[in-house]
Image: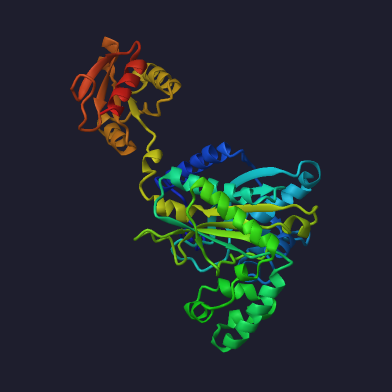
Amino acid sequence: MSEGLVRSIRGMSDLLPPESGVFAFIESEMRRVFALYGFREIRTPILEETTLFARAVGEETDIVGKEMYTFTDRDGTSLTLRPEGTASAVRAYIEHGMDRNDPVARWFYTGPMFRHERPQKGRFRQFHQIGAEVFGLQDPHIDAELIHMLASFIRELGVEGVSLRLNSLGCDKCRPAFREALNIFLKRVEDSLCDDCRKRMTLNPLRVLDCKKEKCISVTMDAPSATDHLCDECSSHFKGVTHVLSAFGVDWEADKRMVRGLDYYSRTTFELLATAPGAEVGSQNAIAGGGRYDNLVEMLGGRPTPAVGFAIGMERLAMLLGGKAGLNDRPVKIFVMSAGSGTLSLAANLVSGLRKLNIATEFDGSERGFKAKFKRADKSGAGFAVVIGENEMEKSVCVVKSMSEIPLADGKKQIEVPLSGAAEVILKMLSERGNQ
């Protein structure tokens, strides 16, 4: 007796064509653009010791306190599915001696992350991120170059209607004065804050500014700004970032409320928001964000090392792309079909020749009838169908048929092509069609 269908876990979805093609397109452009800036790819485990995220992300954050997927391994070790990528990158940087031997590193990565949140539009329990990290460089031009790379990547994807928001959280020298001013302000509005924010006031008052509840946003609208309390060094750094961004031609807006959702940020913080009408990617409309985290390497046991990075939400980015990248998921150009075993060798030889010419080809050499094969050819999205039946075998030809209203090279919808050199002839037809 059947026990019923086993379904995917809530908030963890399958990624099927054509959506998977959009993800492949994003990843392909990521590798191309990031390589232009000297970044190299790393791959870290999905599972890490829970201590890593507790120390890096922050015990007081919602991520660590409410959202992590954590379990005890057979040896008693507490393990966690990674909720973000920076902590793993820092752990790898320290573990492999980069902080001692070659402190400057430009890394990028992509993969699934996990947070036990309430599933909603643009927010899932398994989601995918693209991340980039720069270690060992403190100059403000690195912050600006990293942001420029992010902006260039988004532009190359064809995404429009985005806005860059920028802030500075200061450093260990100037943040205490900001925290004190913020605490004084928050005590005046404490009764109007949500229960979580009243707890955050004690543990980490900056977290109150990150609350997404409308009432908390409203009552803290006039809260003190970190940028009003910056020391001379942090102020100079922030001005340097904005100066280089201007040199790169990157537009930005100041956002004094931006503290991001992670405790390790210092100085520069930034977000990229979808602002075009109808560009809905979820409740917050943030598609990317990041900042500087100069203390994190040392916090996790490494040598003092400046660092800056960002993360991009791939699901949200895919929503903005919509169908723009859809053609990247329809790679089949040619659908070859034969009449079965008698013509199989000829058809297989042609298919091999087409693929050697980098022409995406689907092949059906089964005993099914041609009517069923043409239905499959139509569903495949192929531009041409190539038929090799008994008659074609006797004449040493194949029949090439257009699967759209666009005619072939001589204006006909269907022509015969000699099997000898057929792959090259079909390649020429595809090239000519590309110019129509």
Q: Residue at x 61, y 45 (%)?
A: 108
Q: Give the percent coordinates (x, y) of residue 5.
A: 46, 58
Q: On the rendered image, what quadrant is the C terminus found in?
A: top left
What colouring method underlies this structural image?
Answer: rainbow
Q: Is residue 353 left or right of residue 139?
A: left
| Left or right, 7 with reference to 298 | left
Residue 33 drawn above or below residue 190:
above
Question: Could one spot residue 182 in this view of the protein?
Answer: yes
Q: Name the spot of residue 45 as percent of width and height, x first.
A: 67, 49
- Inspect this view and state whether residue 47 appears: no
Q: Is residue 115 left or right of residue 315?
A: right
Residue 377 is left or right of residue 141, and the answer is: left
Residue at 34% from the left image edge and 25% from the top image edge: 336
Q: Nearer the viewer, residue 56 or 401?
A: 56
Residue 295 position by quadrant: bottom right
In the depicted view, which residue is nearer to us: 422 or 203?
203
> Foreground residue, 325 or 363?
325
In the rendered image, residue 269, in percent from the top left (x then y), is placed at: 59, 60
Q: Please name whichever residue, 391 or 127, is drawn nearer the observer in this view of the structure.
A: 127
Image x and y of residue 24, in percent: 47, 42
The quadrant where residue 185 appears: bottom right
